[in-house]
Image (spheres, rainbow, N blue to C red):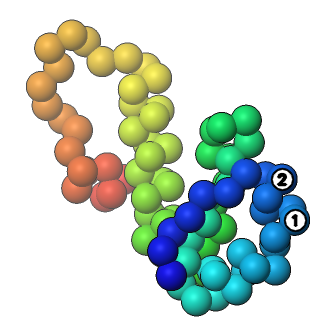
């Protein structure tokens, strides 16, 4: 099952179908006003939880601002360890 994207309205109308797709191993991103607001994934999908945590840490780092020319201190493995 390929991953997919649906609007919140579509998700509301087709929730049973989306659940079947997720049960089959799919991953559905739900958008509102063109922005992702939720992800429907199978229970126990640790990969998604780890990715979400890494994105949150990276977002917090970039929100503080990095100096121009910053060339170190952040790499993918480090984000996943924290």
At x 33%, y 57%, the residue is 80
From what the image shows, is residue 17 above or below residue 65? below
Q: In the image, residue 18 lies at what x, y percent?
A: 72, 75
Q: 12 or 68, which lies in front?
A: 12
Residue at 31% of width from left, 58% of height from top? 81
- Say if residue 19 shows up in the picture: yes
Discs 1, 2 touching: Cβ within 8 Å = yes
**Crowd rating for badge 2 (residues with CA inside 10 Å; few <14, some 14–19, many 20+):** few
Q: Which residue does the image show at 17% across and 20% down from the upper left?
A: 70
| 67 lies left or right of 36 | left
Picture layout, residue 67 above or below residue 72: above
Establish if 61 lies above or below 67: below
Q: Residues within 10 Å of mark 1 (few under 14, many from 20)?
A: few
Which residue was labeled with disc 1?
13
Viewer-proximal residue among 68 and 35: 35
In the visual, does 69 lie left or right of 43? left
Residue 35 screen position, x and y as percent: 64, 39
Q: Name the residue under label 2.
A: 9
Task: Name which residue lies at 56% across and 64% down.
Answer: 4
């Amino acid at each position: 099952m390929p991953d997919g994207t649906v609007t919140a309205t579509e998700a509301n109308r087709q929730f049973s179908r989306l659940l079947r797709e997720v049960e089959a191993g799919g991953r559905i991103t739900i958008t509102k006003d063109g922005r992702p607001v939720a992800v429907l994934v199978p229970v126990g999908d640790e990969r998604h939880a780890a990715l979400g945590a890494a994105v949150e840490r990276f977002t917090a780092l970039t929100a503080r601002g990095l100096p121009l020319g910053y060339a170190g201190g952040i790499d993918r493995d480090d984000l996943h360890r924290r």
